[in-house]
């Protein structure tokens, strides 16, 4: 039955966009034809003034655009532009604070990924989430295991899992453990899950970030086969060459705002890069630039770790801020963790003050005067259940003890000193860290390394998730540290941050160092082209 623009099921009278049911007879057939044409013509997904806020940041601000049925629609932008957030809203992971999402002509409010899957929307995440100890089939049907009489229909599940894997070209035994698959195969298994659920809209978030060239080509073939079957693919990526190869249209986001949508055949890679940047680098002259760089404090020679980065060499001198630019998956954080002893590397060497050293643990790195601020402060830098002072002293407990016990008086005095120096807004050293704003938490995480008096600081995303005021304060602090003789390796997804602060910039793409630019040479468009492997320096 047809009521207005909606299709109602003849069985239950509820809205059912999957099963059009029209009246019999010539008039009914005519009405059904008009309705079918209207369904095919209307966008399959529409975002209307979608806004999403997180503590300290507006991830999306009034974003509106439409995705056509059956197309491959790319969403691009710099790190932090809001691409993944938009995809997660469509997949039911986040709910918008304002605006609305329309799927197949109906406003929807997904409360969970299950709601989205029931409506035909699935997401292939950049970070794969599987249970490695379960079988591939069990992972494909996770949360919806087929049962009969309270027992799992194992044979039925295996047969259907085999069909689902065949649809994406993955020749794997569905009874094998998921942990036995390579990363690229896990990515295909996740796509198989989406396709097997009958999803008509598949959102792929940076699907090739951890794939080799051959593996990425296989993924592209799968995208092509999905489109032939009428599946709409939303492709979230930084990689311009992939966008030009796969997408019918491309939407550009910048700083959480909608810039525009273009047909890929009517634009160029350079134009997309310009739209992604969309800004001029404002005049900024950090104080440390007036100081002549001193001795080499950190050297990296031909460092390689299979599957993460390869043949990386650079030096870091006293008084310098060296920016390390690259897209997600380029190997930036992996390189930082290898230098700090968190992860191993296969070949090459690290030098401290010109002398080769062997760093096999963070403790050894700290003893050599190296500190690492990791990209995820809540999981990797701070202990949320502890106070500010206790977090600040984590890296130097051996220096604060008296015999077998911690000298709490010295710990409190030290914490008060550094909290004052960094203008941490908290009631005192005993204030719980999880009660602080993101900016003040980040200051505590930085202060932890300053208290060790390290001379080399590796800062990975130092202003992620902080407000504008805290960001300016942290920028000033980083500049002051370099001016005082520290050597700083700055890793950031925010290109303006790297351009404003750095003495010179190293660019990683696909795990390789593709170039080094002086501050004068580092135009935004040029750095972005190098990051996306469209150029080399």
Image (cartoon, grey):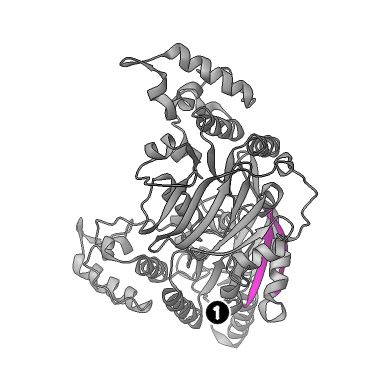
**Residue at 50% over, 75% down:** 231
Residue 110 shows in the view = yes
- Total labels: the figure holds 1
Horizontal side of residue 254 vs 110, given as left or right: right
- Quadrant where the image shows the C terminus: bottom right
Residue 141 shows in the view = no
Horizontal side of residue 231 vs 360, given as left or right: right
Q: Is residue 258 magenta?
A: yes
Picture coordinates of residue 375, whole percent (x, y): 51, 45
**Residue at 35% over, 59% down:** 346
In magenta, the rendered stretch is 248-262
Picture coordinates of residue 78, whole percent (x, y): 64, 58
Q: Quadrant of residue 477?
A: top right
Up-down relation of residue 257 to residue 186 (above or below): above
Q: Nearer the viewer, residue 389 or 53?
A: 389
Picture coordinates of residue 203, whole percent (x, y): 51, 65
Up-down relation of residue 89 to residue 425 (above or below): below
Q: Which residue is mark 1?
A: 23
Q: Nearer the viewer, residue 238 or 373?
A: 373
Looking at the rendered structure, the secondary structure element under dot 1 is loop
Up-down relation of residue 123 to residue 368 (above or below): below
Query: Which residue is farthest bottom?
Result: 26
Q: Is residue 173 magenta?
A: no
Query: Which residue is farthest right?
Result: 283
Up-down relation of residue 130 to residue 201 (above or below): above
Type of secondary structure dominating the magenta stretch: strand
**Residue at 50% over, 66% down:** 510
Q: Nearer the viewer, residue 311 or 420?
A: 311
Picture coordinates of residue 299, whole percent (x, y): 50, 50
- Quadrant where the image shows the N terminus: bottom right
Q: Residues within 10 Å of mark 1 (few under 14, many from 20)?
A: some
Q: Quadrant of residue 438?
A: top right
């Amino acid at each position: 039955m047809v009521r207005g623009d909606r299709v109602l099921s003849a069985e239950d009278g509820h809205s059912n966009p999957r099963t059009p049911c029209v009246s019999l007879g010539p008039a009914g057939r005519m009405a059904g034809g008009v309705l079918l044409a209207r369904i095919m013509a209307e966008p399959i997904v529409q975002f209307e003034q979608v806004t999403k806020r997180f503590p300290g940041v507006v991830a999306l601000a009034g974003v509106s655009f439409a995705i056509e049925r059956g197309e491959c629609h790319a969403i691009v932008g710099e790190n932090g532009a809001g691409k993944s957030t938009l995809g997660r809203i469509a997949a039911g992971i986040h709910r918008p604070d304002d605006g609305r999402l329309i799927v197949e002509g109906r406003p929807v409010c997904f409360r969970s990924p299950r709601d989205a899957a029931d409506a035909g929307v699935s997401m292939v995440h950049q970070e794969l989430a599987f249970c490695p100890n379960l079988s591939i089939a069990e992972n494909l049907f996770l949360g919806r295991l087929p049962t009969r009489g309270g027992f799992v229909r194992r044979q039925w599940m295996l047969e259907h899992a085999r069909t689902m894997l065949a649809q994406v070209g993955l020749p794997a035994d569905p009874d094998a453990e998921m942990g036995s698959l390579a990363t690229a195969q896990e990515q295909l298994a996740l796509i198989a899950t989406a396709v097997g659920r009958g999803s008509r809209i598949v959102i792929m978030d940076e699907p090739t970030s951890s794939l080799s060239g051959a593996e990425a080509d296989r993924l592209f073939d799968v995208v092509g086969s999905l489109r032939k079957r009428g599946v709409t693919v939303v492709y979230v990526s930084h990689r311009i060459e992939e966008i030009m190869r796969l997408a019918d249209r491309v939407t550009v986001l910048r700083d959480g705002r909608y810039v525009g949508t273009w047909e890929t055949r009517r634009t160029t890679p350079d134009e997309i890069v310009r739209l992604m940047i969309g800004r001029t680098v404002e005049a900024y002259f950090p104080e440390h630039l007036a100081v002549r760089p001193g001795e080499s404090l950190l050297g990296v020679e031909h460092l390689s770790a299979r599957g993460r980065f390869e043949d990386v060499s650079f030096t870091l001198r006293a008084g310098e801020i060296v920016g390390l630019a690259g897209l997600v998956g380029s190997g930036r954080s992996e390189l930082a963790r290898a230098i700090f002893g968190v992860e191993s590397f296969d070949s090459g060497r690290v030098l401290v003050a010109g002398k080769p050293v062997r760093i096999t643990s963070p403790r050894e790195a700290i003893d050599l005067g190296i500190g690492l601020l990791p990209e995820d402060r809540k999981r990797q830098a701070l202990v949320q259940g502890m106070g500010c002072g206790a977090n600040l002293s984590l890296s130097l407990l051996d220096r604060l003890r008296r015999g077998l016990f911690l000298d709490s008086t010295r710990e409190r005095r030290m914490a008060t000193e550094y909290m004052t120096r960094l203008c941490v807004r908290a009631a005192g050293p005993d204030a719980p860290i999880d009660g602080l704003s993101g900016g003040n938490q980040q200051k505590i995480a930085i202060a932890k390394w300053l208290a060790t008096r390290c001379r080399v600081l590796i800062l990975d995303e130092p202003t992620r998730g902080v407000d504008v005021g805290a960001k300016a304060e942290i920028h000033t602090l980083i500049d002051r540290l370099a001016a005082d003789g520290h050597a700083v390796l700055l890793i950031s997804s925010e290109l303006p941050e790297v351009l404003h602060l750095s003495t010179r910039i190293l660019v990683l793409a696909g795990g390789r160092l593709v170039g080094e630019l002086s501050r004068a040479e580092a135009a935004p468009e040029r750095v972005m082209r190098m990051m996306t492997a469209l150029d080399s320096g």
